[in-house]
Image: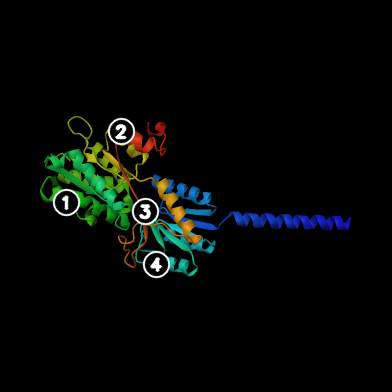
């Protein structure tokens, strides 16, 4: 009987050890994911897509959202280091604040990918995965040019710019793309900025916050557009566009003889897509976060497995400390006429969600 108990105990231990070893084999390790906030739908979508893509490749994930609080994001990343992550995917709130924590990560041999927002002033990370943000600005500028028929010589038109947050490198890159298209029309007087606010520092929206955009639009309308109609607004993303639309509707735009201006956006968030379909917003730029998350996950996997990592830009993204090997994905302009083709037929949104 004693021998039988000993044999049973041995079998239990063997099964337990075998089970543990098989479990360890099926997981390639833990990847930490640090996102700026849950207040924007695009970051929750990015986070969910990233988790799904990495788990399909055999990794465990730990995702953290910092609610646009820089100290919180740094603390969350430090906690991920303690948990023993093999890799980090970081979308920084402020790309200039990560020097110390990245050095700690690199000393531990952790692979780090800067996700969508560029980490600045550090050599202690490996890759950057993003959309072509200069092209995003070009698409926004072209949307305004086409809608106002500026190439046909129409104008002058009253115009204002609402850019993103200056602590986000993307805002600088998108702004450069916008100005590459619109500067000739600003120079020849076909686009008139009555507020006089043109430089990025003047038109920036901290944290891409729609409420702050709404407040600034209120002030501009009150000071400069009493009897003048505003014809176009370069809103750099959909959160900003929502704030701009709210301000304009509050003073009577979209009713009677005061049509809504041409308003751009970015991220193809549901409220803005609905606004496009009803005519409050003219366009947005769609960046398929599923594709970016999948590409980033594959980059991480290849780096950790010692395989070649795909990048397609090794010259453009100088972060102040190095030129960062970068993978760029292409954005797509969305207007009322191609909402179904781009967003529904691709499976990004169901048709009923946009009703």
Q: Is residue 231 left or right of residue 245?
A: left
Residue 11 occupies quadrant: bottom right
Of marks 1 and 4, the one in the foreground: 1
- Tell me the residue that label 2 is attached to: 277
Where's residue 288, x and y in %? Answer: 38, 45
- Mark 2 or mark 4, which has the lower sequence index? 4
Q: Does residue 317 lie above or below 190 as drawn?
A: below
Q: Residue at x 40, y 53 (%)?
A: 36
- Disc on the earlier residue, 1 or 4: 4
Image quarter of the N terminus = bottom right
Q: CA distance from mark 3 to mark 4?
A: 20 Å
Residue 275: give x, y in percent of width and height: 31, 36
C-alpha separation, residue under disc 2 versus residue under disc 1 = 29 Å
SS for dot 1: helix
Label 2: which secondary element: helix
Crowding near the residue tagged with mark 3, few <14, some 14–19, many ≥20 C-alpha atoms within 10 Å? many
Of the numbered discs 1 and 3, the one sitting upstream in the chain is 3
Q: Which residue is mark 1?
A: 183
Tell whether 208 sits left or right of 161. Answer: right
């Amino acid at each position: 009987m004693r021998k039988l108990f000993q044999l049973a105990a041995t079998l239990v231990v063997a099964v337990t050890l075998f089970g543990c070893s098989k479990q360890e084999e099926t997981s390639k390790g833990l990847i930490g994911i640090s996102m700026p906030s849950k207040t924007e739908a695009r970051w929750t979508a990015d986070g969910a897509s990233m988790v799904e893509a990495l788990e399909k490749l055999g990794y465990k994930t730990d995702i953290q959202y910092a609610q646009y609080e820089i100290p919180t994001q740094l603390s969350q990343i430090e906690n991920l280091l303690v948990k023993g992550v093999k890799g980090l995917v970081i979308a920084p709130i402020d790309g200039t604040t990560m020097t110390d924590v990245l050095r700690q990560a690199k000393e531990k041999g952790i692979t780090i990918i800067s996700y969508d927002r560029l980490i600045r002033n550090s050599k202690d990370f490996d890759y950057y995965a993003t959309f072509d943000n200069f092209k995003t600005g070009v698409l926004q500028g072209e949307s305004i040019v086409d809608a106002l028929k500026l190439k046909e010589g129409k104008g002058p038109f009253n115009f204002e710019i609402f850019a993103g947050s200056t602590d986000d490198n993307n805002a600088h890159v998108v702004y450069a793309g916008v100005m590459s298209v619109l500067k000739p029309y600003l120079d020849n007087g076909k686009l008139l900025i009555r507020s006089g606010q043109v430089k990025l520092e003047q038109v920036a929206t901290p944290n891409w916050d729609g409420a702050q955009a709404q407040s600034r639009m209120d002030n501009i309308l009150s000071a400069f557009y009493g009897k003048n109609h505003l014809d176009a607004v370069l809103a750099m993303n959909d959160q900003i566009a929502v704030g701009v639309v709210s301000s304009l509707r509050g003073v009577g735009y979209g009713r009677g003889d005061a049509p809504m201006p041409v308003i751009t956006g970015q991220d193809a968030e549901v409220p803005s897509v609905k606004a496009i379909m009803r005519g409050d917003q003219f366009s947005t730029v769609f960046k398929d976060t599923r594709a970016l998350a999948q590409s980033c996950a594959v980059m991480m996997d290849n780096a950790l497995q010692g395989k070649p990592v795909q990048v397609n830009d090794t010259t453009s993204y100088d972060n102040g400390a190095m030129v960062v090997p970068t993978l760029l994905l292409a954005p797509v302009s969305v207007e009322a006429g191609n909402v179904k083709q781009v967003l529904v037929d691709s499976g990004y949104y169901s048709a009923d969600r946009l009703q």
